[in-house]
Amino acid sequence: MKNVLNYKIGRAGNKQTNHPTEKPEFLIGGLVEIFTKPSDIVLDSFAGGGTTGVAAYKKGRHCISIEQDHGFIQTIKDRQARAERGEGS
C-alpha cells in the first residue's frame, strides 16, 4: 500500500501546530464541503491541533471539537481565535 496523496502541511510546508499528525487545512476543508452543508455541525472527536474546527469555521459550518490532551487545547483555542479574526490558522 502506498500514499496516493502528496501535499505540504501549512504555508510552504511549514506546520501550523506541534501535533505529530497534523493534516493540511485545504484537505480537511474539502472533506467538510463534500460531506456537509453550510450551518451543519461537524464533530471532531480527536481534535488534535484543531485543523477540522478551523476548516469547518471557514466553510461556514459549526464544529464540536473534543481533545483529551490538555497540551493541545490552548493550540485549538488560539487557532480558532485567529481564524475568527481572519488571520488564517
Image (cartoon, grey):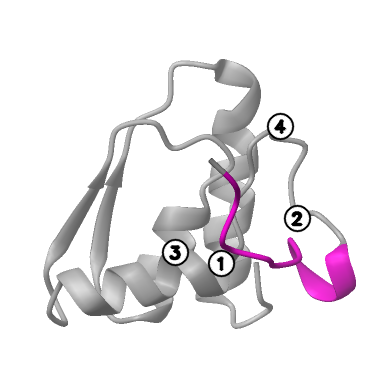
Distance from disc 4 to disc 2, alpha carbons, whole Å, reads: 11 Å
Residue drawn 56% across the image and 60% down it: 4
What amino acid type is highlighted by mark number 1?
Glu
Residue 36, given in percent of the width and then of the height, sits at: 15, 72
Callouts 3 and 4 close, C-beta under 8 Å = no
Could you say which is closer to the camera, residue 15 or residue 82?
Answer: 15
Question: Which segment did they paint magenta?
Answer: 2-13
Of mark 2 and mark 3, the one earlier in the sequence is: 2
Mark 1–mark 2 CB contact (< 8 Å): yes
- Please rate how many residues cluster around mark 4, counting C-alpha atoms within 10 Å: few if below 14, some from 14 to 19, many from 20: few
Q: Mark 1 points at which residue?
A: 25
Residue placed most toward the observer, 56 or 29: 29
Q: Is mark 3 on a helix, strand or loop?
A: helix
Which residue does the numbered mark 2 point to in the structure image?
Answer: 16
Question: Three-letter amino acid code at disc 3?
Answer: Ile
Q: In this view, does 63 lie above or below 56?
A: above
Q: How far apart are marks 3 and 4 (CA)?
A: 16 Å
The residue singled out by tag 4 in the image is 20
Q: Do the residues labelled 1 and 3 touch (CB within 8 Å)?
A: yes
Total marks placed: 4
Type of amino acid at the residue the image marks with label 2:
Gln
